[in-house]
Image (cartoon, helix red, strand yellow):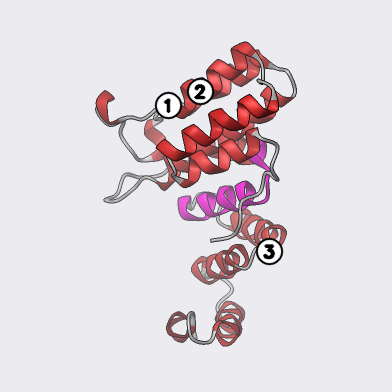
Amino acid sequence: YAARAELEQTTAPATALIDVERAARLEPREWRYQRLLAERALADGRTSDAVLMALATYARFPHNPAVGMLYARALLHDGRADAAQRLLDTVTVLPYEGAGEAHSLYREANLLSAVERIHAGDSARAQQLITKAREWPERLGTGKPYAQDVDEHLEDFLSGIALRGVAPRADLEAQVQRMLADRPDSTTSHVLRALLGAPAGRPGR
């Protein structure tokens, strides 16, 4: 059923969902089917459902890094950056080829939490979170690249705002648009939208 769901995903998504649900019922001890259901909820924009599914799976498989990252991603999509940030402080991921999601989630969660502290006027805590976002913890399975390959413009931008305070709306929007034009990646877009006061949760993907 899970294999058929993969084939049906683009042509018959409703049928694919039924097949994944059936696979999960037949083998409830298999975390991969639970992950597929949560990822489908995220793709459909049902972020609260995805959080509940991911939490239930994480409670059963707390030492599975793939499940931990799924739960963190669901929390981020649901606008719960602080919870995602605290979770990612406990996750351990073994190095593997192509690894990087764990660090990306860790960076984004810390930066979004920093934005929340900036809006709350807590500059000191915002700076602490920005400093954490710059780190590359070994337990997340990805080594730090060479310094010239690390882009910290977003961290620098937020650090400056934390020090100076949030600029007038028009000035801030102009700064954000320049940053997005230069660096239109999803993390930058998500963090800067939060800085402008847009809803914290991002669309499902």
User: Label 2 is placed on what type of residue?
Assistant: Phe
* Camera-side mark, 1 or 3: 1
Q: State the residue at coordinates (57%, 36%).
A: 192
Label 1 near label 2: C-beta < 8 Å?
yes
Q: Residues within 10 Å of mark 1 (few under 14, many from 20)?
A: few
Is 108 or 190 nearer to us in this picture? Answer: 190
Q: State the residue at coordinates (47%, 50%).
A: 65
The residue tagged 3 is 46
Report how far apart the C-alphas of labels 3 and 2 lie in the structure.
Answer: 32 Å
Q: Residues within 10 Å of mark 3 (few under 14, many from 20)?
A: some
Residue 20: tell me if it is visible. yes
Query: Of helix, strand and loop, which one carries label 3?
Result: loop
User: Label 1 is placed on what type of residue?
Assistant: His
Q: State the residue at coordinates (52%, 38%).
A: 108
**x, y (%) of residue 97?**
26, 51
Is 11 or 197 nearer to us in this picture? Answer: 197
Report how far apart the C-alphas of labels 2 and 1 lie in the structure.
Answer: 6 Å
Check the image and name the residue furthest to the right.
Answer: 120
- Indicate whether residue 75 is drawn in magenta: yes
Instruction: Report the predominant secondary structure element of the magenta stretch.
Output: helix
- Indicate whether residue 99 is drawn in magenta: no
**x, y (%) of residue 189?**
53, 42
Q: Which residues are magenta?
A: 65-83
Q: In the rendered view, would you say 37 is above or below 126? A: below
Q: Examine the image and state in which quarter residue 27 appears.
A: bottom right
User: Label 3 is placed on what type of residue?
Assistant: Arg
The residue tagged 1 is 153
Q: In the rendered view, would you say 103 is above or below 127? A: below
**Residue 28, numbered circle:** none
| 113 sits left or right of 180 in the view | right
**Residue 157, numbered circle:** 2
Q: Examine the image and state in which quarter residue 109 appears.
A: top right
